[in-house]
Amino acid sequence: MPTFPAVMPGDPAAAMFFEHLADADAAALKLCKQSLIILPPVAPRQPPGACRPLSSFGSGAVAASVSLRNLADASGTALKRLIRLGFGLVVGMWYLYGKQNFIVMKMTFLDAATMGDVSFEPFYRFGELTVYQTSTPEEARERVKDVEVLMINKVLVDKQLIDAAPNLKLICIAATGVNNIDVEYAASKGIPVRNVVGYSTDSVAQTTFMHLLSLIGGGPYFDVSVKSGAYSRSGMFTDPNWRWWELAGKTIGIIGMGNIGRKVAQIAEAFGMKVCYFSTSGTGHCTEYPCLDLDELLKVSDVVSIHAPLNERTKDLIGRNELAMMKPTAYLLNAGRGASVVESDLAEAVDDGVIAGAGVDVFVQEPLPESHPYLKMKHPERMRFSPHIAWASVEARERLISMMAENIAKGW
């Protein structure tokens, strides 16, 4: 779907549009002048059936009568001009804003169940939307045969799927990362891939601190203490049996100082924490906080929080050797990418007391296999898990849909 420039010299469609617009403006002005009615003063009410000469109503009524005759005479010409104006507007809008506003596009969302209860209403203005809750690879290839705009979240968009969609013009992913799309092959076919950036910053940062506060504050233990009746039976006004710490004065080391990393840093400062970071790209562009190498960051931090994209520099970034550098009282948080951490090494380190605990929202394989090391730990109480939901607050999902609609509106 092409998009068009605002002005294209010599284009006949543009000339036609502006010519009709000028004609219509002149006709509208003339019609307004001719149809101006001056209301007469209020006259005494007449008995039913009584007739009065027009002149008895005063000069205002005479003017009204004349204007109505002029209106009738002008209406035929005005109608013709309005028809011409309507045609010109259609041509002009087509020219100025692109065909996407007039063509009924075929759109398909292959794994809408991942979006929860969010409304897809922003997509309806573009045309025909078909929604599938889930799609196997075989189902996906069958469902994209006539699709022009493909929307996915975690469905694999490989060469086979792209080749199964001969009419495909645009791929929109409901995420920031595009690891599940063969972007190079799509580009070779002239198919743009558009992701969404920045929609989940607040959501991910909040989830990061949800895990941290639960770990360092002992929330689950105290909740069970009250609900189980243990507190009621204790005979004391408090429960001092679980040691917990303040965040103030502690150091948080952030791996990846992008939008989310910065937001985490700001919240950490509000708690009185000291902030440092490791640049996974090696640029160290953020000057607000000290940039350390990874080994130093691991050694000095009380909390290490991962917010980096997955690439060749960040895959298996934290393994047995790196965990051994951390303080035994430190916590590791991962709301970035599961593969940035060697999961079996983390489970072992937490069980063995190498570090105090961890909060994890992302996994190498999702959903998490029942045989996973995280689910076989001796000390599960030292871990906090969430099923990859850090991105998915109500507000974040609404922003995501809105920004996907903006991506479609750009055309191709």
Image: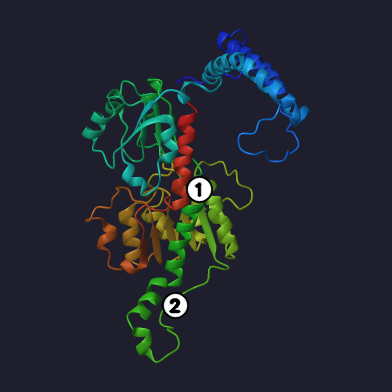
Question: In this image, 182 relative to 407: left or right?
Answer: left
At x 66% / y 30%, what residue is drawn? 51
Give the alpha-carbon distance from disc 2 to disc 1, as whole Å: 31 Å
Closest to the observer, 79 or 382: 79
Disc number placed over residue 256 in the picture, else none: 1
* Residue plotted at (67% across, 38% down): 46
Q: Residue at point 40% right, 60% down?
A: 359
For badge 2, the amino acid type reads Arg
Helix, strand or loop at label 1? It is loop
Image spot of residue 269 (x, y percent):
59, 61
Give the quadrant of the N terminus. top left
In this rendering, the answer to whether 67 lies above or below 110 is: above
The quadrant in which residue 166 appears is top left
Residue 347: % across, % down: 32, 60
Q: Is residue 17 left or right of residue 371?
A: right
Tell me the colour scheme of the image. rainbow
From this view, report whether residue 200 is shown above or below residue 11.
Answer: below
Provide the secondary structure element on which disc 2 rests: loop
Q: Is residue 365 left or right of residue 35?
A: left
Q: Check contact, mark 2 vs mark 1: CB within 8 A.
A: no
Q: Nearer the viewer, residue 68 or 363?
A: 68
User: Depth check: 362 or 1 in front?
Assistant: 1
Q: Residues within 10 Å of mark 1 (few under 14, many from 20)?
A: many
Residue 412 visible: no
Name the one closer to the observer, 100 or 207: 100
Residue at which label 2 appears: 243
**Residue 145 visible somewhere in the drawing:** yes
